[in-house]
Image (cartoon, coloured by chain):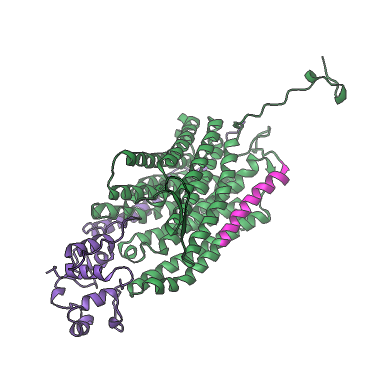
Amino acid sequence: MTLKPNPNPKKMRPYDVAPKPRRTLIPGGVDSAATGFFVAAAVWLAIAVGIGLLAIGIRIIPFEFSFGLGVFDLSFELNVRRVDAAFVNATVYGWLTNAGFAAIAFMTPRLLGRRLAGERLMNVAMVIWNLSLAGGIAGLYVFDLGPHAALTAMLWLFDGGLATGALVVTGSFLATAGAAIRSGYVSTWFAGIALLALLGLVGLNATLGLLELFVDLPELTVALASVFVERAIITLWLLGMAYATLHYVVPRATGQPLASNGLAMLAWVTWLALAPVSALATLQDPSVPYVFTTLGAVATMLLLVPAALAVVNLVQSIQGRWSLLFGQGTLAFAAVSLAFLLATALLEGIGALRLVDARVGGTDWERGVFLWATYGTFTLAAFALAEHALPRILRRAWGGGMLSSAQLWLTFGGATITGLALMGGGLAEGSLRAAGTTGEALDAALVVYRVAGFAGFVLVALGGVALLVSIFVMYTAGEPAEYVVSGQAAPATGH
Amino acid sequence: MTVHTPIESRSGGVPRWAILLTLFVFAVGGVYLAANLAGENPPLGIPGASAAPPAASGEPDPAVGEALIGQVQPQCTTCHGPDLTGSGAFPSLHGVAGGPVSENLQDLGAEYPDNWAQLWIAGAPETEGIDRMGMPAYGDQLSPEQIESIVAYLKTLQ
């Protein structure tokens, strides 16, 4: 039987209508994992900046409170340490890691020319990761944090959830990359090592948490492992993904080839050699040989090398397309991210010098540098990829515009102001402590820096809101579009 | 279906300047490492660790003072050296049992021979006007008993 071109719907019988495609509970379509991780990342960004404002605010107007939850003698406690831990976790595991997973889900198929393996499993991993993280962060306000650093302070059960999520994403990446990784672009190499490092580190953390249940581990051992894992997650996972992302987006945004593959591989090799060693610098205890921590400090200083190589290579790749830097799109985000990358590497190198560390260690200086790294370098690299990828995976004509400008300038301005204010506060704190100022007098002297930091972070928060609004408006009001790779006749998901 | 779009690069080799620059910076790092092989790390500030060990009631305990310097106030060893024998502009703390060793504390030692060290560490009003030379005041961070214990420990250093 053949159907008339325009049948009268009232006369149609049920079998004349083509069955509707079944919508599965867990999506498994092309780019569904990248979409999910991007959306989760944007939501976590909003949460993280909210907690960040609380973390700065609680230092300006100190307060803490607790109340019993009525079960197992547990109580909700809000104080500086718990808010700090929640902020760092929401930023690193929430915003930046979801953005990193989204980058992997988006870039890998496009770099290797094959569909992402286990897309549906990736979506399951997204749910596991984010539910574990939400539970873990809530638990930070309830359970004993012990001697753990912020990124390892969650309950072992939630650490296990994170490790499971990372395992699935890594499995999917490796299954997709397979043998092709040998001929892969440098972004694949950066992302591959970063992902394996994340899996190893969250796995180690979960194992330690589990061990603590059965064995009474020495407090110092746990604390040392904890600070090492925290630092390594930043230098290996976050920094690695920033390199992967920037090497991916800059050539695409400029429409020009990468200036030098050799330079990119040299940056990769030096980063790979230095990043894990740099985490040794955090093991500052008499039980650790002095030479180990010095080696870590030297590696931290030398991390300036891969940063400089990457910046030179990518700036050379922009050559001839300088006008794009002053636009509102991907390249502007990437350029600001590169500037922060260089500045942060320099500041971390200076901070690793023993004399400087003795003065500013433990002060707001460290928080300022951390904010430059996370909300300057890593966030703007993630924004650059989002600006490039979201229109392609949502198939919308979108790019630049007021919302992109708002994202760029609010985040750039906010991160700059907050970082400078906190670093200035840290320097002042070090000087004042050396001059004998303590207690309330010290806090009073630092208020002005913290207020400036708070004001700057309000701008970062607005930048995060701009990203959320941008995704929403792009999806609901953007014109449908197909992105076609030049030289290809058929519509494709874009490159 | 996704489309394979390999990214090309203009050149595949590593520029010579990049290799030389990398080697040079690594060499500078090696020199820094060689110059900083000896020393002792300060104690790790364990977050959430129990507060400073209290001094036993009654007599100040040098062992408690040593523990305080080692665990709670690593700044002492950071500036005065791992064995408190001095480092750079920061004086040695050995021999304070006989009175202040620093020039700037001679008057304080003469005026308060029994408790000049306690006053100095706490940053008491009696020390106002004296150039602290970068030495923080710990009156807000340590109890008087803890400062007594630290002084008792310092007086054991010959």
Residue A428: give x, y in percent of width and height.
41, 71
Segment tinted magenta in the rendering: A458-480
Q: Is residue A114 left or right of residue A237?
A: right
Near-viewer residue (B96 or A106): B96
Residue at (19, 68) in percent of width and height = B58
Compared to residue A8, the image places residue A92 above or below, namely below
Chain painted in green in the figure: A
Residue at (44, 71) in percent of width and height = A446
As drawn, the residue found furthest toward the top would be: A1
Residue A104: give x, y in percent of width and height.
52, 40
Answer whether residue A319 is visible to the viewer in this image: no
Q: Colour of chain B?
A: purple
Q: For residue A476: magenta?
A: yes
Quarter holding residue B88: bottom left
Residue B59: give x, y in percent of width and height.
17, 68
Q: Is residue A488 left or right of residue A361?
A: right
Q: Is residue A272 left or right of residue A477?
A: left
Residue at (22, 83) in percent of width and height = B108
Quarter holding residue A489: top right
- Magenta residues: mostly which secondary structure? helix
